[in-house]
Structures are given as C-alpha cells and as structure tokens.
C-alpha cells in the first residue's frame, strides 16, 4: 500500500479510482447494449463510444500530469495520450497505468499544497490542487451517470 502524506489526497485518489473503474464498467455495459450515444449538442467526445471512453481515460491521466506540472515536478514516466485509436485497444492496461501513476505521483502531496494557490487548467479555468482532485473524481462519475440514464431508458 502506498504511503500518503495527506489523508485528504489519499481519500481523493481512492475515490477517483473507484469512479474511474465504475465508469469503465458502465461504458462496457453501454457498448454491449448497442444503445445510441447520449445527446451531446455537438460535443466531439460523444461522436462514438470509443471517443467517450478515450476522453474520460485521457482526462484522468491529464489531471494527474497537470497537478505535477503546476507544482514544477513534471511526470516523466507517463505520457499524455488522448487518442482513442491508441487508448481503446489497450483500455484496461491504460487505465491501470494511469491509476498506478495517480498513487505513485500524488502520494507525496502535502496538505499545504492543496490550497489556496490557484493554477490555470488546460481549459483555462483556475483551480487549486484540491479542486482539481475533486473535479477528477466527479468527471468519470458524470459520464457514468449519463450512460446509466441511456441504459435505463
């Protein structure tokens, strides 16, 4: 078990892992169902199921990489990949690499690093480290819920 310096970070890393795994399980059920993609109003990530899963998995890795980058300690053993053609063929392995990276690279975070300093996200909004960790937990949850609605409908 990885030793974390912050109980808050440990909890968020564990929650993220549960939500990302849950999203992937739901995505697999969704693909097997043959049901149509949720309405997305022009969002390219909803073009097809592979784009959606690559978006969620790529974002999970991106959040962790961003945290280390803004702290001036970039990750060198995991690259940012968002291409569905690369992610989907090795989907489970990609996710496991990402989750292992979360534990390996975020365990050293200390409570004092979580706030109040804000950093510009890749999409231009300001986030503290704590806010980005919470965003990372909720992101796959939101996509899972969207797919569950389609599956129930």
Image (cartoon, rainbow, N blue to C red):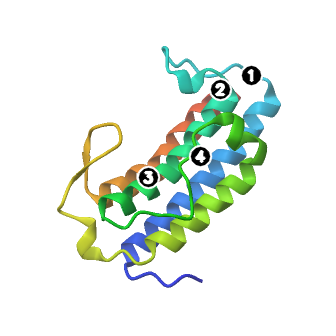
Which structural element holds mark 2?
helix
Residue holding disc 2: 150
Badge 3 vs badge 4, beta-carbon distance below 8 Å: no
Q: Nearer the viewer, mark 3 or mark 2?
A: 3
Residue beneath label 3, please? 63
Q: Secondary structure at mark 4?
A: helix
Circle 3 or circle 1, nearest the eye? 3
Q: Are marks 3 and 2 in contact (CB under 8 Å)?
A: no
Does residue 36 appear to the left or right of 42 in the view shown?
right
Name the N-terminal-most of marks 3 and 4. 4
**Residue in the image at 76% along x and 38% along y:** 29
Q: Secondary structure at mark 3?
A: helix
* x 56%, y 59%: residue: 78
Q: Is residue 142 above or below residue 113?
A: above
Q: Nearer the viewer, mark 4 or mark 1?
A: 4
Q: Which residue is mark 4?
A: 57
> Dividing the image into 4 quarters, which one contains the C terminus?
top right
Residue 45, located in which quarter of the rendered image?
Answer: top right
Q: Where's residue 33, x and y in %? A: 80, 29
Q: Which mark is residue 103?
A: none
Residue closest to the far front: 76
Q: Position of residue 82 (x, y in %)?
A: 57, 40
Mark 4 nearby-residue class (10 Å; few <14, some 14–19, many ≥20): many
What's the distance in space between the residues labelled 2 and 4, CA to CA?
A: 20 Å
Quarter of the image with the N terminus is bottom right
- Callout 2–callout 1 Cβ contact below 8 Å: yes
Tell me the residue that label 1 is attached to. 35
Q: Quadrant of residue 6?
A: bottom left
What is the spatial separation of the Cα atoms under label 2 and label 1, in whole angstroms?
7 Å
Q: Is residue 35 left or right of residue 69?
A: right
Relative side of 133 to 78, left or right: left
């Amino acid at each position: 078990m990885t030793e974390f310096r912050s109980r808050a970070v440990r909890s968020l890393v564990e929650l993220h892992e549960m939500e990302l795994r849950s999203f992937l399980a739901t995505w697999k059920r969704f693909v097997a169902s043959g049901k149509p993609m949720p309405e997305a109003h022009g969002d390219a990530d909803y073009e097809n199921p592979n784009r959606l899963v690559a978006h969620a998995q790529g974002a999970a890795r991106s959040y962790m990489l961003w945290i280390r980058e803004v702290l001036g300690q970039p990750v060198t053993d995991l690259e940012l990949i968002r291409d569905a053609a690369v992610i989907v063929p090795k989907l489970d392995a990609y996710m496991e690499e990402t989750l292992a990276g979360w534990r390996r690279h975020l365990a050293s975070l200390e409570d004092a690093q979580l706030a109040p300093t804000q950093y510009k996200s890749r999409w231009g909004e300001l986030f503290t480290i704590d806010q980005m960790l919470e965003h990372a937990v909720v992101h796959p949850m939101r996509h899972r819920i969207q797919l569950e609605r389609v599956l129930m409908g």
